[in-house]
Amino acid sequence: MIKILANRRRFIAALIIYTVLMLALWFGYHRLTYESVSRTSRENAELAADKLLEQVSAEFMQMRNIASVIAGSASVQDFLAASPDMVDLFYGKAGNVSEIIQKTAFPISSIDSVISINADGIYYRFTGSLSNNSCSELFEKFKSAGTSYNIIELDEVLYFCHIAPVYASSEQEPRRVGIIIMLTNLGRIRKSLFDNASLTVVDTAVVQDNIILLSNNEELENRSNSALHDKYGMVSRKNISGTGLSIAAAVKSEDLFPESSLFWVSSFILLAILLATIIIFYRYLSERQKLFDTEILNQNMQIGLLNSQMDAHFIVNSVTSIRALSMRGDNEKAGCMADGLAQLLKHRHGGDSDSMCGIFDELEMTDKYISVMNIRHDDKFSIEYDIDDALDAYIIPAFILQPIIENALTHGLQNKSGEAKLKICGCMLEDNIYIEISDNGSGIKPEKLEELRIMLESRVIGRFPAPGLSGVALSNIQRRIRLKFGFDYGLSIESAPGSGASVKIKLPAIKSGE
């Protein structure tokens, strides 16, 4: 029974451990995979932002260098300081400036317009085709501005705008004579910056004042910067030095975890395996529980039959003795014997068929039994106890000592001349209880001893004990112990002819109340 219970506990523990391990594996896999993909996505976003930042910064640096060269040219300074009333001189100087601009700005194909505006607001378009109104708007907006970048809409087109002030350096005190403005169409910038993007899972954008001006995803343009954080799983943003602009690179939500479908499929398979395993274990344990319950029922029936056989064996002998004493006229002894028998039967049947009791309670009943037997045999028997007091805290199966003592008195000491002595010892060793019942009787013949040992060591326990009252004491106790505790426990017997016999009982140490 204990072995079956232990197996059941082991199965339940194994199921719990397996479930915990499977769940830990699932969450661990999810965590590691998510962190790995997130790290890769973050690196990709930062790489895209750095690459776009490098491109835009290079574009602006080239515009600044060109503007610096043009603004520092003496021909440009003279042109802006000249009076447009002197037409021939004015256009002659304009031709020189145009030549300088063409040579300087020619390598930068993204510049659409180069415009000069003098201090009086007179403008000259060297390249491009801006309207007069747009040129006037540029003057009003930037006539006193220093070197700067801006985004401006002119003629319904958005431009990157670089402003470079021009000073007449030939005079003792530098005097501002005008500005050079270079314009680049944002649409052209988009094409040059985004068409060759190598990271297709990353969307990039140019942002000014939290408004998206340019993006390779046109749906984002002219929307608030918060749209990036609402739509994308990860955003990296970097400022363009010297400007009010920033570069943003965002990983699309569906690409932040590109293996999500694989993950969910594998997770589903993992959970399906877990569920199937739990169902299999549950059904297996249910079947085991049914078998266990059936086995317990059978064991209780067997133990009940065994006990009834022992009861009958003892009762038959006792009643026979009472009858003999009564017929002999020894009514006082018959009455004492009947009273002792009643107390023994009351103790034996006070619990269920498989009850446990304290060791010293069992020894007290042993004393009563010996008293009954001494009435039958004229105080022939004496008994000595050597029981460790520590055993008082432990319990053993009830009514297992009396049949062994009866066997010793009947077969070992009954025909002995002189003192017939019985000794009961008890101790605990390595979490087991050992009880030894020895006598100084005639002993057991070798062939009979071998027969008893073979019977006691047999690992076959039938469904029901053999019927009858003869020779059931030791075998029935062995069966009771092994049905209850397993084959690691039970009886062993030692004897030599003329030197008495010793029966040792090994039981698990079970404390009262457990």
Image (spheres, rainbow, N blue to C red):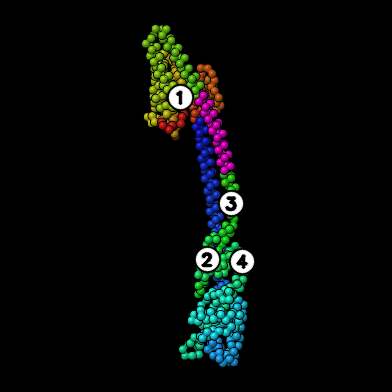
Q: Secondary structure at mark 4?
A: loop
The location of residue 404, given as percent across then percent down, is 46, 21
Give the residue number, with chain letter if any, for mark 2. Answer: 224
Which residue is drawn at the image coordinates 59% and 90% (left, top)? 92
Crowd tier of the residue under label 3, counting other residues whose Cα lies within 10 Å: few below 14, some 14–19, many 20 or above:
few
Q: Amino acid at mark 4?
A: Ser
In contact (CB < 8 Å): disc 4 and disc 1: no
Give the residue number, with chain letter if any, for mark 1. Answer: 352
Distance from the alpha carbon under mark 4 to that under mark 1: 84 Å
Give the residue number, with chain letter if any, for mark 3. Answer: 264
Q: Amino acid at mark 3?
A: Trp
One can see residue 440 in this view: no
Q: Is 245 in front, or is 475?
A: 245
Residue 349: which quarter of the image? top left
Q: What label sits on residue 198 in the rendered view?
A: 4
Which residue is drawn at the image coordinates 58% and 52% (left, top)? 263
Q: Tell me which numbered mark, 4 or 1, is placed earlier along the sequence.
A: 4
Q: Tell me which numbered mark, 2 or 3, is placed earlier along the sequence.
A: 2
Whether residue 6 is in magenta: the answer is no
Q: Secondary structure at mark 3?
A: helix
Distance from the alpha carbon under mark 2 to that under mark 3: 34 Å
* For residue 153, above or below residue 366: below
* Numbered range of the magenta stretch: 275-302
Q: Is 171 in front, or is 144?
A: 144
One can see residue 134 in this view: yes
Describe residue 76's horizontal placement relative to residue 385 as left or right.
right
Between circles 4 and 1, the one closer to the viewer is 4
Which residue is drawn at the image coordinates 46% and 20% (left, top)? 403
